[in-house]
Image (spheres, coloured by chain):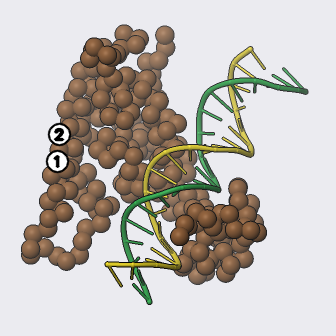
Chain colours: A brown, B green, C yellow
Amino acid sequence: MDSSACYDKAGLRKGPWTAEEDQKLLDYIKQHGHGIWPLLPAKAGLQRCGKSCRLRWINYLSPHMKRGKFSMREEQTIIQLHALLGNKWSAIASQLPKRTDNQIKNHWNTHLKKRLTKMGIDPVTHKPKTDALGSVIDQSNKHASNLGHMAQWESARVEAEARFVREMKSVSKPPLDSSPTQLTNKSRVGQARQECPDVLKAWQGVASGMFGITKDSLESPASTFTIQETSQ
DNA sequence: AATCGGCTCAACCGCTATTGT
DNA sequence: GACAATAGCGGTTGAGCCGAT
């Protein structure tokens, strides 16, 4: 079995969706719900595979999703959670209402990853990059004053990561009198995050120190994250 | 005006996890 | 437990946009 094979079925359309297809999908889901995805295209009159319909709905058509620029707060959350979870886009998305894993993944790959690299932070490990001798690379020699902030951030991150691991262990071994209802990954992530306010504080310190942003701009949902110290 | 290159993001692909029988 | 169907995840691709030349 390979669900991706659905894209290869004869007669099924691939590629960008037309407005007409969007409307058909939207109308059908509004009336009936999505039901079983592989059965939906035939019922909705679409020449698409169910997987394609599902993706289109989740990533584009769903009324619950938000489009447009990521706010400073959202970017901050993504960076925090990426430090904790790595490329677990769906887990990260679960903490960002109205954003999809695909949106977050794209935003990370096109913006945040580059930004961290520019700052001399390894986007994979979230640690300051080091050269072969183990010294911190500071390509422009302008980030030296930021290293203290990065150390503060890194310290908080490691502490939070350790706490997260402990949390996961305790969840995986529930007490005997605990509810039989298992926690989902999403709720576990959410629980862990709620207990990491120090990460938030550390990031706010880093952000305000590195980019000259105020607490107000950090709180503003409309504010976007722009590097102000890139002029050479 | 043409074209070139970089960037963005929707969509595809391949795979694993989960659920039902 | 085995198997099939379905759902979902994360990596990758490529079309289209846009600014620079």
Q: Where in the figure is residue A49, as x and y percent of width and height? A: 64, 69
Which image quadrant is residue C2 in?
bottom left
Chain containing the residue with disc 1: A
Q: Residues within 10 Å of mark 2 (few under 14, many from 20)?
A: some
The answer to whether one can see residue A170 in this image is yes
Residue A148, numbered label: none
Position of residue A64 measured from the top left corner of the image (x, y, whole percent): 50, 63
Q: Residues within 10 Å of mark 1 (few under 14, many from 20)?
A: some
Which residue: 13% across, 73% down?
A178
Please say if A175 is above or below A83.
below
For the residues beneath circles 1 and 2, the answer to whether they share a chain is: yes
- Amino acid type, residue under disc 2 in the picture: Glu
Q: How many numbered marks appear?
A: 2
- In this figure, which residue is indicated by the disc labeled 2? A159
Q: Is residue A41 left or right of residue A201?
A: right
Cα–Cα span, label 1 and label 2: 6 Å
Task: Please indicate, yes or no, whether residue A212 appears anywhere in the rendered image.
Answer: no
Q: Residue at x 27, y 26 (%)?
A: A150
Q: Position of residue A73 (x, y in %)?
A: 38, 42
Say above or below: A197 vs A217.
below
Label 1: which residue?
A163
Whether label 1 touches label 2, CB < 8 Å = yes
Tell me which residue sits at (29%, 44%) in the image: A84
Relative vertical location of residue B15 with respect to residue A215 in this rendering, above or below: below
Q: Give how far across and how far down residue A1 sits, in percent.
A: 53, 70
- Indicate the secondary structure of the residue bearing disc 2: helix
